[in-house]
Image (cartoon, rainbow, N blue to C red):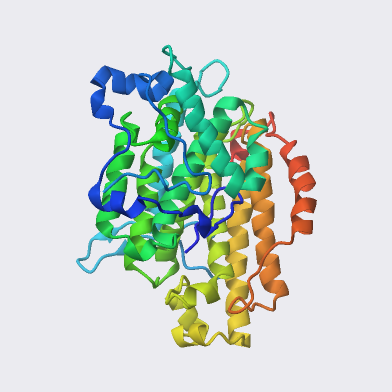
Amino acid sequence: MSVALFWVASTSSELSNSFGFFDSLRDGNRLFDSSRLGSRDRSLFFSSRAKKGRSQRLNPGSICTDLRLGCSNFDGQSNMPLTSSMVVSPAGEMAISSEEKVYNVVLRQAALVKRQLRSSSGELDVKPDIVLPGTLSLMTEAYDRCGEVCAEYAKTFYLGTLLMTPERRKAIWAIYVWWRRTEELVDGPNASHITPTALDRWEARLEDLFQGRPFDMLDAALSDTVAKFPVDIQPFIDMIEGMRMDLRKSRYKNFDELYLYCYYVAGTVGLMSVPIMGIAPESQATTESVYNAALALGIANQLTNILRDVGEDARRGRIYLPQDELAQAGLSDDDIFAGTVTDKWRNFMKKQIKRARMFFDEAEKGVTELSAASRWPVWASLLLYRKILDEIEANDYNNFTKRAYVSKAKKILALPISYARSLIGPSRTSSSANKIQI
């Protein structure tokens, strides 16, 4: 299942020219032997403070060549579809919903950012580089490689990142590449060979890079990024959990389950990105609400992916639609596999599209709160992904044999519109009563 990034990105399988990739997953080997460095040296290296070493030139056609590692029930009428109720377990214990679980992560991310805000200006205090002789070119090369990957596979977003400050631009590139590599584990051409053990090794590798012990050049860029920005590891771990879900699960009994999956594989990207994108100093919105809007955009994008790819997923034996809502509409798995557009299917799709648009509406509330240099690529993502829903409708809800896509002409037209919207920042006169609510 293709993951919806916080922005518009290509999902080409050409990324997985997997030279040595699956051997490394199996064996758990690392390319960069940080054991050669002392503990002090390891921590210095990955804040752009490395001992000078030999860097590798990567294959421009692959970002995986250097890998070494062993809601609610929606009735269509509620104004706020983003809340879900508590549920009772068979043992009689009260269990929290998926949204409550995700909300706890949102609070954790927001608290981390708050601790790093400068009390004087409200700007994120990005830690400066402490560069030792001979190390700057090594880290520069790592970030440049991430930028090359982003430019190749996420062209629209890459152009938007060029408006950011150099530090934020490089950090977003590093996060994009990590996300891309993670998705390729279960969505790439060799996904059938990936096991839960391989994902466990990928998670261990993630923990290492957060501790300043990366395995390769691309990991080094992310390790440097998380040392500078208030980025928490939890969304990264949760995304890997989403990959595990794809290995073991092909049906979702209700929207609460689907919401959690959407958070894992796409909402997490929003939480990773907000500390890098930055919140405008003049914003009167709560930090939590900005994170919630970023989360909503990830959920909206992933729901859009799901609705666009119904036929493609069905051919792989997967149905990413709430089973209970299908039943309520008089539909079953057999109807999905048959791929026939009926009035029942049209009515079902109308409700699903309406839900996705409500998440987009929720996301819009937070885009204006981002720093000025970050708003354009996010607005572009939001507007272009929303248009996919329009294209599904234009195809008479035939997402079985027709793939809804936004034409190049429409993309070009959307760019000046998104740029114009990006010029509108948060109101300095907003009262606390008008702050975005989660």
Can residue 80 be seen here? Answer: no
Residue 421: image x %, image y %?
74, 42
Residue furthest top in the image: 133
Residue situated in front as seen by the camera: 393 or 19: 19
> Which residue corresponds to the image point at 31% horizontal and 47% vertical from the top-left?
202
The image shows residue 412, relative to residue 191, as above or below, that is above
**Of residues 171 and 383, the one drawn nearer to the viewer in this rendering:** 171
Asked if residue 68 is positioned above or below residue 11 in the image, the reply reads: above
**Based on the displayed image, in which of its 4 quarters is residue 53 positioned?**
top left
Query: What is the x, y in percent for residue 383?
Result: 69, 53
Q: Nearer the viewer, residue 298 or 121?
A: 298
Q: Position of residue 394 (x, y in %)?
A: 73, 73
Residue name at image x 61 percent, y 51 percent? 8
In this view, 133 is above or below 405: above
Residue at x-position 63% and y-position 74%: 350
Q: Quadrant of residue 194?
A: bottom left
Lateral position of residue 265 relative to residue 37, left or right? right
Image height check: is 173 above or below 35? below
Whether residue 332 appears in this view of the structure is yes
- Coordinates of residue 420 in the picture (x, y in percent): 78, 41
Left or right of 33? Residue 129 is: right
Instruction: Please report the residue visible at 43 percent of the width from the left and 49 percent of the height from the top.
Output: 181
- Horizontal side of residue 369 vs 134, given as left or right: right
Closest to the observer, 251 or 145: 145
Residue 350 lies left or right of residue 3; in this view the side is right
How many numbered markers are drawn? 0
